[in-house]
Image (cartoon, rainbow, N blue to C red):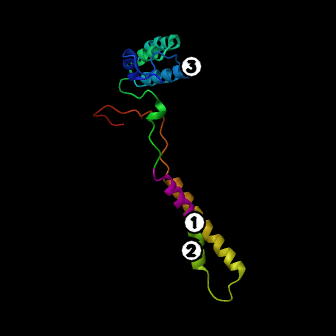
Amino acid sequence: MAGPGDEKAAAEGQGRGEFRASHADRERVIGTLKAAYVEGRLTEDELDARVGQVYASRTYAELAKVTAEVTADIPADPARARSTRDPWRATKIAWRIEYAIFLPGIVAVLLLPGGPHTSVTTVVVMTTVVYLLFWVLGVSLMISSRPPKRSGGQLPPRSAPGTDG
């Protein structure tokens, strides 16, 4: 992978600067250049020129020269820039399972009328009602906690200061 540090390493005879770059390496560098273009670090003409240089490059050192100026402070691999997984993810999933399956069952057992005259129909109806109630509450909580949809980045027009409307 050609990154900002590869040019320096190649100049010092270290790293893999003299090795041939693969097509996948070129595509990753182009992705990095596109990210720089989106961030405003390159114009469209500069992007086109650098993409041409990328396809003409044969080694990692040549790829590094193409991206050295614009990628000094952005990651060379966008996949590595992603945030790590939530460490509490497994715990949250376990709590959801507990909420959806075990807790309604415990509540249904606690709500059942005791004694020898409790019929199977009463047990089934009570358990069904409790499970449905928990699941409806769970779904409504999930829907209400969803983040609001974005408007596509467009802001409503603002009126000039001192005017109404």
- Where 8 falls versus 165 (above or below)? above
Is residue 96 highlighted in magenta? yes
Does label 2 or label 3 sit earlier along the sequence?
A: 3
- The location of residue 127, given as percent across then percent down, is 64, 73
Principal secondary structure, stretch drawn in magenta: helix
- The location of residue 57, given as percent across then percent down, is 50, 12
Q: Secondary structure at mark 1?
A: helix
Boundaries of the magenta span: 87-98
In this figure, which residue is indicated by the disc labeled 3? 23
Amino acid type of the residue that numbered disc 1 sits on in the rendered structure: Phe
- Where 152 falls versus 98 (above or below)? above
In this figure, which residue is indicated by the disc labeled 1? 134
Label 1 crowd bin: few (<14), some (14–19), many (20+), radius 10 Å: some
Q: Secondary structure at mark 2?
A: helix
Q: Residue at horizontal 56%, vertical 74%?
A: 107
- Where 39 falls versus 101 (above or below)? above
- Where 104 falls versus 22 (above or below)? below
**Mark 1 or 3: the one toward you:** 3
